[in-house]
Image (cartoon, rainbow, N blue to C red):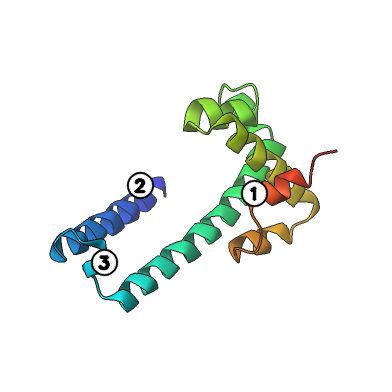
Amino acid sequence: MINLFLAALSNNFTEARHRWRLFGGNATGGIPNEIRQHLSEVISHYHANNAAFIYWLAQYDGQRLYLEDGFTSTYDFLVRCHSFSEGSAWRRIRVARLSLKVPAIHELIAAGYISFTVLSSSTHS
């Protein structure tokens, strides 16, 4: 599944780079509506992927799968294995744990209505 995702990402990047060259390396040289359409599509996928990421991170954390993978915590997994910054890892873990209590969070993230920063700050005591 990861390979399919990376292939799709690579193909999208390759297509974007081709379009960049097609318009002479000028970001404003493209057809404005086409640029807006592609940007909106990418943003939509970004929010949906964030929601899916939080869902699966909550499952990983809740089942303590990081122990089977040789990590001391989900935080350790995100920072050491996936190069997340410390702050970014903590925010996402707090949101993932909150999502187990409030599942509607996934829909808010997928729609782009709320950010990790806002959600994670609401979990502070």
Query: Which residue, given by chain and number where applicable, does mark 3 sit on?
Result: 28
Q: Is the residue marked by circle 3 packed among few (<14), some (14-19), or many (20+) residues within 10 Å?
A: few
Label 2: element kind:
helix
Amino acid marked by disc 3:
Thr
Left or right, 27 with respect to 51, comes to: left
> Could you tell me how far apart the alpha carbons at marks 2 and 3 are, in whole angstroms?
32 Å
Q: Would you call the spot at circle 2 few (<14 residues within 10 Å), some (14-19), or many (20 or more)? A: few
Front residue of 46 and 70: 46
Q: Which mark is residue 116?
A: 1
Of badges 2 and 1, the one in the foreground is 1
Which residue is painted at 72% across and 50% down in the image? Answer: 119
Question: Which comes sooner in the sequence, label 2 or label 1?
Answer: 2
Q: Is residue 65 above or below residue 2?
A: above
Tell me if label 2 and label 3 are in contact, CB under 8 Å: no
* Quadrant in which the C terminus appears: top right
Residue indicated by mark 2: 3
| Residue 45 in the image: above or below residue 89 | below
Q: Position of residue 57 (x, y in %)?
A: 62, 43
Which x, y percent locates residue 75?
62, 29
Please, what is the three-letter code of the amino acid marked with disc 1? Phe
Earlier-in-chain disc, 2 versus 3: 2
Q: Is residue 116 left or right of residue 100?
A: left
Disc 3 versus disc 1: distance between alpha carbons? 31 Å
Q: Secondary structure at mark 1?
A: helix
